[in-house]
Image (cartoon, rainbow, N blue to C red):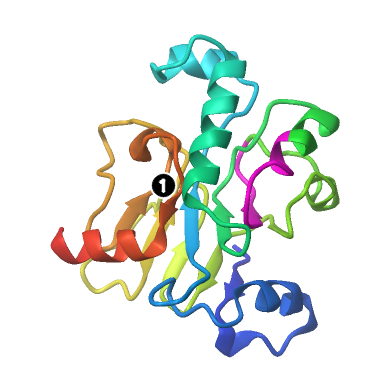
């Protein structure tokens, strides 16, 4: 499986220059004006997800507007948001209309519903797009689906989406965090908060 390295120590390769410029100066999301947030599974325009996941919305428009409002309440224009897959069920024009309303520099790690090519997603407003998991700061493995195996000796912390509100997965453990919208009141969560909660898990 291919993995992109999203760690400042590995940014000597040209393909990582744009991500490097986005994350430059941000140390684990802590103590800096520019913060790092994560989220997953917005499912913009997907009316059936309201029924499937018992989301508290009356329509897809209601869901979309609430997510946009919640996002922009916590994310500033200079922050970075890593979206861990499953963005939108709309076409290109409507997806771009929504993504461009969302504050921050947006990195997409594609999920199972994000089948269009990377250029398509960048044209809708993402600053960087990866078809594979990424490793940030040599410790955080960020991928759409949860890890299939890990134990106490695994030297990584996994951040994922995909599972929505499934009770099979805890929201935060000492080695993992699920950043699905349902887990965080339909709002991006700051990396610093995940780190603090993991220490208490």
The magenta region covers 98-112
Q: Residues within 10 Å of mark 1 (few under 14, many from 20)?
A: many
Compared across the picture, whether 190 is left or right of 121 comes to left
At 59% from the left and 16% from the top, the residue drawn is 60
Magenta stretch: includes residue 36: no
> Going 51% across and 73% down the picture, which residue do you hit?
136
Q: Position of residue 3 (x, y in %)?
A: 60, 67
Count of numbered labels shown in the rendering: 1
Residue 114, horizontal then vertical, whole percent? 68, 39
Q: Can I make out residue 78 in this image?
A: yes
Please state, as top left, top right, bottom left or bottom right, where the C terminus lies in the image.
bottom left
The picture places residue 62, in percent across and down from the top left corner, at 55, 17
Q: Is residue 142 above or below residue 28?
A: above
Residue 12: x and y in percent read 70, 90
Quadrant of the image for the N terminus? bottom right
The residue under label 1 is 179
**Does residue 34 sit above or below 123 in this rendering?**
below
Q: Nearer the viewer, residue 66 or 11?
A: 66
Residue 156 is drawn in which quadrant?
Answer: bottom left
Asked if one can make out residue 174 in the rendered structure from this viewpoint, the answer is no
Nearest the camera: 118 or 197? 197
Tell me if residue 110 is in the magenta stretch.
yes
Q: Please name the residue shown 66% across and 85% down the image.
A: 11
| Residue furthest to the left | 200
Q: Secondary structure at mark 1?
A: loop
- The foreground one among 104 and 196 is 104
């Amino acid at each position: 499986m291919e993995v992109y390295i999203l760690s400042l120590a590995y940014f000597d390769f040209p393909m990582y220059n744009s991500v490097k410029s986005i994350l430059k100066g941000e140390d684990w999301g802590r103590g800096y004006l520019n913060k790092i947030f994560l989220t997953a599974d917005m499912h913009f325009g997907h009316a059936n997800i309201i029924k499937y996941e018992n989301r508290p919305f009356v329509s897809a428009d209601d869901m979309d507007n609430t997510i946009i409002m919640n996002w922009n309440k916590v994310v500033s224009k200079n922050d970075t948001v890593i979206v861990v897959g499953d963005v939108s069920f709309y076409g290109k024009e409507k997806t771009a209309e929504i993504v461009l309303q969302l504050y921050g520099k947006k990195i997409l790690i594609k999920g199972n519903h994000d089948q269009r090519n990377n250029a398509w997603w960048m044209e809708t407003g993402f600053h960087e797009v990866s078809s594979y998991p990424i490793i940030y700061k040599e410790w955080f493995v960020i991928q759409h689906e949860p890890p299939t195996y890990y134990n106490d000796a695994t030297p990584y912390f996994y951040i994922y989406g995909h599972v929505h509100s499934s009770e099979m997965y805890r929201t935060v453990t000492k080695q993992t965090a699920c950043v699905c919208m349902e887990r965080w009141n339909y709002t991006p969560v700051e990396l610093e908060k995940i780190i603090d909660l993991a220490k208490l898990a």
